[in-house]
Image (spheres, rainbow, N blue to C red):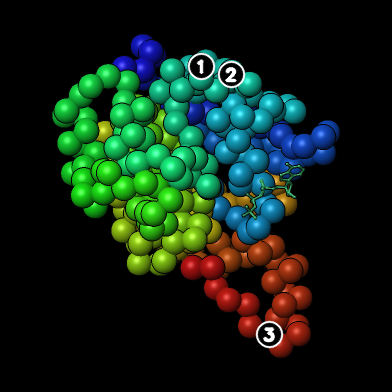
Amino acid sequence: MAESVPAEGPVLTTESLTAGYNGVVAVADVNLSVAAGEVLSILGPNGAGKTTTLLSLAGLLPTMNGQVTVLGEPVDTGRPYRMARRGMRFVPDDRGLFPSMTVNEHLRLARRRPDKTRESMVFDRFPALANLQSRTVGLLSGGEQQMLAIAVALLAEPRLLMVDEMSLGLAPMIVEQMLPAIRDLAHDEGIAVVLVEQHVGLALAVSDRALVLNHGRVVLEGEAGALLRERDRVESAYFGAGEFADDESDGSERQSVL
Ligand code: ATP
């Protein structure tokens, strides 16, 4: 089990989170909060600062300024095992799996203790994995690998799950199955989930709230259903009004992100 933590209050908060690389700011003044059972999507164009934000939330990148609090305590940068012990799981965009190990070996390593109920819950959520237990990860499809990455995180009984670009390299049909599965496990099990996604429409459809980053700043945030209905606001936050206008001026039509 994860360490005992206060049951009330947000699972994750930031106050003026500012982070970057080699002294150069990549994201600035990000304020967010995620409650148990809630899905927050972080959206934005390439280079907007989504992964940087997620790495800072996970304690994998030191903040330059501001504060990240997970389950009532400041994030312990540089000691990810401590955050893992507190119930945080981070699924990177490369999924963090070992190609020569089998599905079953991953699941055995991931579980905190033998727990048949937990294991069958994982197979109920991702039935395809049950028949692939002896297969090595390198031979799994992208979607199967993503299922395994989430299953590995789930076996650790997380309170906070962060997933970077889950849909990277996956066929749209698989993304359409995986994203609702993430929403269901957040809502059913009370896990706070932070998703970084390029599939804006799908992400909004499965999220409770979302924020759009552009050039390292939060330029739009709100309830996901409302944002889904305010297509124009999301589009201009995503592209930035100036860039959007430039593209229209050369006669080309910018592809919608929704
Ligand atoms: P993408 O959707 O393309 O993955 P992103 O929104 O996740 O983009 P980040 O990867 O967070 O964006 O990058 C934000 C900024 O930080 C970019 O300008 C990027 O070039 C820069 N950056 C990212 N990683 C590093 C690094 N390791 N060293 C220096 N600069 C970096």
Q: Amino acid at mark 3?
A: Ser
Residue visible at 49% across and 68% down in the picture:
258
Q: Residue 100: x, y in percent?
A: 44, 43
Instruction: Tell me: is circle 1 under 8 Å from ligand 1.
Output: no
Query: In the image, is 95 to the left or to the right of 111?
Result: right
Q: Earlier in the sequence, mark 2 or mark 3?
A: 2
**Where residue 252 is drawn, which disc sits there?**
3
Looking at the image, how many numbered discs can be counted on the residues?
3
Q: Is residue 54 visible?
A: yes
Q: Quadrant of the N terminus?
A: top left
Q: Amino acid at mark 1?
A: Arg
| Residue at image mark 1 | 82
Q: Residue 168: x, y in percent?
A: 50, 57
CA separation in Å, label 2 and label 3: 48 Å
CA separation in Å, label 1 and label 2: 6 Å
Asked whether the beta carbons under mark 1 and mark 2 sit within 8 Å of each other, the answer is yes
From this view, report whether residue 199 is shown above or below residue 5: below
Q: Residue 38: x, y in percent?
A: 37, 38
Q: Residues within 10 Å of mark 1 (few under 14, many from 20)?
A: some
Q: Nearer the viewer, mark 1 or mark 3?
A: 1
| Residue at image mark 2 | 79
- Residue lying farthest to the top in this orientation: 4
